[in-house]
Image (tube, coloured by chain):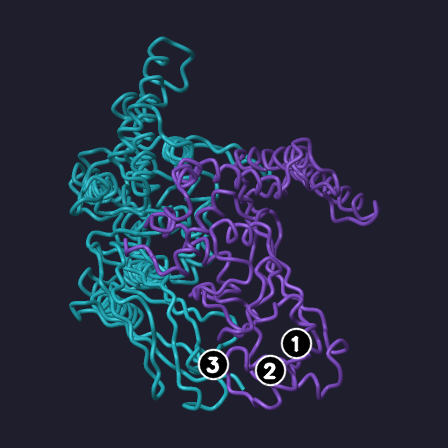
């Protein structure tokens, strides 16, 4: 098949799950009952679920010294990340982190498509967990479809109630964990048990919990198809060498049922036995045999299930597999295909990504945990009793360590410049304070106008050194 | 409270808002009844740029539900809150009222903290490190704009650290200055003094009061002219705190030193205002602030916390 054929190929929009497409502009979306799947990609997805959720649910319970290891204290505007105490002024690091994340996305997407969507996105991860609970309680696809199609019964009531209770419990725990990143989780837990949480905490626990319940329990693929902006622009990062979940049409067609014992060559059919399992396992309800579609989140459940079918039929695996458009077109072997991973786009993304990670790491490593802001008083400069020109400044000293700092301030930048302030300036752990500083200059030292000066702030041990610029105004 | 000066724009905005909302509903209703051209291949029949065809990709019904919810929300909002022209909304909500409520709430929350200091005399507040920390913040936010971050003032704005007081440095007087404000008024005195030359002679005499460099001969001639000044500043020029008349016999020159500055003051007079804080700050805050100001002037600055 040439690429022109691919472009003109018509993919029916109708869900493959046996629903007729309404000609109305609005249509109820049929519920999808994905069949449970096992296989190598399902294993990777579950690994993704465990790793991300272990981090999410576990992190707030870790302790660091006397405090929670990761805590974003919005009220006090201090952000604790293990040994780091970050101030709002450190948001540049968050920006850096987001840039790194964005570039990782570009890189992963260029190499292997929607890896994020298929293996690590919270929408996928929570849907996976919720579907697992659903499957444990209501049974697999066919049992669930039968249960929903059937009328009211005691069994249905019990199973549905049971499922929703487990879902809701899990959701509230998720909301609670989320709030635990902003309010110390152990205190929050005590408050939760004694039912006297703050009203905002209650709101966020239940809001986040409700979002989890609704998105993972009900919205599922609708989120990816209609809400996620990210799903839509990811396809812009695909090229003809991007690995995507692909049905090998050359090998599969013509599809058709056949006797289990018939040799493939004798049937005159392709390898696809048209068992429809790839459609049944699909969490977005598409038929991968129609080619790459925007609904495909790249979870490779179809690849897993098809491999199982191929094994049973005694055919080679990989009728549905990760492949690229170029590999399909040119009939490349896996190794030829993988060689094209090292193409300029991927190499450039990798280079930029690593230099950014490196720069971010270096900058964090070299960061002085002391910040200083100099704010000059807006009043007119004045003359002291002894005739010097005086300018007054306020220095905001921000201690980003977790111990008390004793600081020493010096002013430099003009001959004879001197300053007066308290002898020893202490700033408590993770606190900031304003210190007024009076700077004097002999009246004839500089011409009228504004002159650059700078403050040098050092701690008692001499391990921290911050220079902050300002100006000294000499009146006319 | 509305910013509309007439009723026209208010009605215009209200009608435009309502028509807009109902137009949204009508649009939804019309499109919901419309069927896309029922092509067998599930396209709408629109073709652009030779071969681009628009597929019929129906929006899910829950989206329609969300759309209706936003419409209902919009109408409910416009009913409850201001937004429909000058209609204030059934809740009578306003941002100023909310601000006042938040201030009240914050003050209630802080009341127990201040209650401790309310019970202390100002002299003791001046020694309490916690009160000092609060006082420092109050000072930085409310006083430092004029008096400077180090409270040493500048030209026209009194230095609060030097023990020289225009209206008295007792705790009661400081508190009065903060709460009620002060209006210092030096009337133009040129006519009462005499010719410009005589004003200069007077200025030399004023300089002599504080022992500043001056021409003693001119000062001697200027001395009789001081009678008009003595009404407020006293015969010895030491001022009068009851009137806020500054002491002219010390080294504090709030409005500038030297003959020219004194001549200008005599000729033009000066009205200098310290705004009253009693409506901006609570009584307890003023109490703590008084302690802070007192601590700076009498050298009993509280020890570092």
**Label 3, residues with CA under 10 Å away: few <14, some 14-19, many ≥20:** many
Residue under pointer 1: B226
Q: Do the residues marked 1 and 3 share a common chain? A: no
Whether residue A85 is situated above or below residue B153 in the rendered picture: above
In the image, what residue occupies the spot 49% across and 77% down?
A381
* Chain of the residue where label 3 is placed in the rendered structure: A
To which chain does the residue with label 2 belong? B
Q: Mark 2 highlights which residue?
A: B205
CA gap, disc 3 to disc 2? 33 Å
Q: Is residue A275 above or below residue A148?
A: below
Dots 1 and 2: beta carbons under 8 Å?
yes
User: Chain B takes which shade in the image?
Assistant: purple
- State the CA–CA distance, disc 1 to disc 2: 8 Å
Residue A1 position in % (x across, y down): 36, 59
Residue A396 is situated, as x and y percent measured from the top left of the image, at 36, 63
Q: Secondary structure at mark 3?
A: strand
Helix, strand or loop at disc 1?
A: helix
Image quarter of residue A93: bottom left
Q: Which residue is mark 3?
A: A473
User: Would you place residue A368 above or below residue B113 in this image?
Assistant: below
Chain coloured cyan here: A
Q: CA distance from mark 1 to mark 3?
A: 37 Å
Q: Which-is-in-front pick, marks 3 and 2? A: 2
């Amino acid at each position: 098949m040439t690429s022109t054929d691919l472009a003109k190929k018509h993919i029916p929009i109708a869900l493959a799950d046996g629903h007729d497409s309404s000609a109305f502009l609005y249509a109820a979306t049929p519920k999808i009952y994905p069949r449970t799947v096992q296989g190598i990609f399902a294993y990777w997805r579950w690994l993704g679920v465990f790793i991300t959720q272990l981090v999410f649910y576990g992190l707030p319970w870790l302790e660091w010294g006397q405090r929670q290891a990761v805590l974003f204290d919005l009220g006090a505007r201090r952000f604790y990340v293990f040994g780091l105490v970050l101030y709002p002024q450190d948001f540049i690091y968050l920006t850096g982190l987001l840039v790194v994340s964005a570039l990782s996305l570009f890189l992963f997407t260029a190499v292997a498509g929607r890896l994020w969507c298929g293996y690590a996105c919270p929408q996928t991860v929570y849907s996976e967990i919720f579907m697992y609970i659903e499957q444990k309680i209501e049974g697999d696809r066919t049992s669930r479809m039968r249960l929903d199609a059937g009328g009211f019964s005691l069994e249905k009531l019990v199973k549905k109630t049971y499922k929703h209770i487990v879902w809701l419990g899990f959701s509230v725990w998720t909301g609670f964990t989320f709030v635990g990143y902003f309010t110390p989780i152990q205190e929050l837990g005590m408050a939760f048990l004694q039912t006297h949480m703050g009203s905002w905490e209650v709101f966020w626990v239940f809001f986040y919990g409700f979002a989890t319940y609704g998105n993972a329990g009900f919205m599922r693929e609708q989120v990816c198809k209609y809400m996620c902006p990210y799903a839509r622009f990811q396809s812009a990062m695909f090229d003809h060498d991007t690995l995507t979940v692909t049905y090998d049409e050359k090998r599969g067609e013509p599809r058709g049922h056949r006797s289990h014992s018939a040799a493939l060559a004798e049937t005159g059919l392709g390898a696809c036995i048209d068992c429809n399992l790839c459609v049944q396992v699909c969490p977005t309800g598409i038929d991968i045999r129609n080619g790459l579609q925007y609904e495909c989140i790249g979870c490779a459940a179809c690849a897993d299930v098809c491999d199982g079918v191929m094994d049973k039929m005694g055919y080679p695996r990989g009728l549905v597999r990760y492949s690229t458009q170029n590999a399909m077109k040119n009939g490349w072997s896996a190794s030829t295909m993988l060689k094209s991973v090292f193409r300029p786009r991927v190499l450039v993304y990798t280079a930029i990504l690593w230099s950014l990670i490196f720069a971010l790491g270096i900058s964090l490593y070299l960061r002085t945990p002391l910040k200083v802001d100099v704010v000059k008083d807006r009043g007119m400069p004045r003359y002291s009793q002894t005739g010097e020109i005086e300018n007054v400044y306020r220095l905001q000293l921000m201690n980003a360590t977790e111990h008390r700092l004793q600081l020493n301030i010096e002013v430099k930048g003009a001959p004879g410049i001197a300053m007066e302030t308290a002898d020893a300036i202490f700033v408590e752990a993770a606190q900031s304070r304003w210190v007024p500083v009076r700077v004097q200059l002999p009246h004839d030292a500089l011409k009228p106008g504004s002159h650059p000066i700078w403050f040098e702030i050092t701690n008692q041990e001499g391990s921290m050194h911050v220079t902050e610029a300002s100006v000294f105004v000499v009146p006319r | 409270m509305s910013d509309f000066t007439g009723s026209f724009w208010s009605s215009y905005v209200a009608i435009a808002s309502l028509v807009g909302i109902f137009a949204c509903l009508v649009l939804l209703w019309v499109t919901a009844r419309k069927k896309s051209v029922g092509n067998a291949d599930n396209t709408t029949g629109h073709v652009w740029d030779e071969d681009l065809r628009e597929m019929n990709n129906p929006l899910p019904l829950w989206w329609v539900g969300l759309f209706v919810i936003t419409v209902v929300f919009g109408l409910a909002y416009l009913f409850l809150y201001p937004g429909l022209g000058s209609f204030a909304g059934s809740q009578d909500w306003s941002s100023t009222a909310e601000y006042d409520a938040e201030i009240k709430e914050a003050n209630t929350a802080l009341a127990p903290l201040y209650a401790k200091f309310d019970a202390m005399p100002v002299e003791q507040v001046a020694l309490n490190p916690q009160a000092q920390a609060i006082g420092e913040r109050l000072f930085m936010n409310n006083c430092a704009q004029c008096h400077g971050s180090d409270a040493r003032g500048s030209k026209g704005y009194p230095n609060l650290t030097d023990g020289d007081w225009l209206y008295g440095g007792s705790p009661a007087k400081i508190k009065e200055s903060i709460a009620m404000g002060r209006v210092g008024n030096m009337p133009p005195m040129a006519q009462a003094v005499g010719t410009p030359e005589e004003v200069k002679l007077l200025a030399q005499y004023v300089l002599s009061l504080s022992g500043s460099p001056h021409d003693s001969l001119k000062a001697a001639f200027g001395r009789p002219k001081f009678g008009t000044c003595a009404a407020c500043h006293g015969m010895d020029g030491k001022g009068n705190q009851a009137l806020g008349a500054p002491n002219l016999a010390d080294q504090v020159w709030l409005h500038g030193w030297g003959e020219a500055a004194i001549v200008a003051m005599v000729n033009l007079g000066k009205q200098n205002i310290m705004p009253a804080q009693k409506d901006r700050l609570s009584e307890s805050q003023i109490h703590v602030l008084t302690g802070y100001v007192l601590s700076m002037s009498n050298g009993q600055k509280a020890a570092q916390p």
